[in-house]
Image: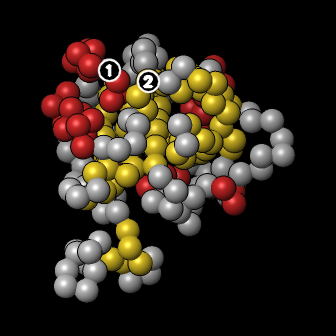
Amino acid sequence: MRPPGLFADSWQCDAHGAVHPLQPVVPPSVDALTVVVNRTRVPLWMPWPLPVGWLFTGVACAGDDTSGGRATAVACSGPSPLGGPGELVLVAEELGVGLGARYAGVPGPDPGPRLDTREPAPAKVLAAGRPTPLWQVEQTPADRAVFAGEAMGLWLWAVVWPEDCGLLLYDELVLADLRDAGSEIHLVPCGALSPRLIP
């Protein structure tokens, strides 16, 4: 990765051209969340209320100081529906950014080529009050389940570990955009940083 310079006004990758850089991941706190809320141009999706026993465990953002956040990833951890620990990363991103693909463990920036939208979506969430279908992303690593769809004109990825924790998404999880949380953001319970967020 090369920063903007004399010959380019954006971050450059030798393989992908102009890219939005991933900002450093910071330990989860209301303050860290507030910083990302104030600089991003895309939603920060979080289940709200969080499922019983679940905690906010980190946030990541791709974008630079000039253009603001073009992709966000919010991590939550808690008990899996079938027992044991579970982790969920929700990514909102503009077309072509690739942050969701990074956490999904798949090549390419967007999920479109890996979605079979001819069949009904197996999972649905309520994103900002709107029913949002999510299709399973094909050819992902066996240790996770990955779903993707469109919300507010942007890609919405849901990546869960282990794979059977994907049952969370079959219950029509309610997602809130934390940019609209106002003072309620101080009610978000924080846990330890999820290692899933660290590149």
- Residue hosting label 2: 176
Q: Amino acid at mark 1?
A: Ala
Residue 3 image-quadrant placement? bottom left
Quadrant location, the C terminus: bottom left
Scheme of colours in the image: secondary structure
Residue 8 image-quadrant placement? bottom left
Q: Nearer the viewer, residue 51 or 15?
A: 15
Q: Nearer the viewer, residue 49 or 132?
A: 132
Q: Residue at x 29, y 72 (%)?
A: 10
Q: Residues within 10 Å of mark 2 (few under 14, many from 20)?
A: some
Q: Amino acid at mark 2?
A: Ala
- Residue hosting label 1: 181
Q: Residue at x 57, y 58 (%)?
A: 110
Label 1 element class: loop
Q: Is residue 127 left or right of residue 131?
A: left
Q: CA distance from mark 1 to mark 2?
A: 8 Å
- The answer to whether the residue labelled 1 contacts the one labelled 2, judged by CB atoms less than 8 Å apart, is yes
Q: Nearer the viewer, residue 195 or 41?
A: 41
Q: Residue at x 56, y 66 (%)?
A: 108
Q: Residues within 10 Å of mark 1 (few under 14, many from 20)?
A: some
In the displayed structure, 27 sits above or below 172; it is below
Label 2 element class: strand
Q: Percent position (x, y) of residue 98?
A: 47, 60
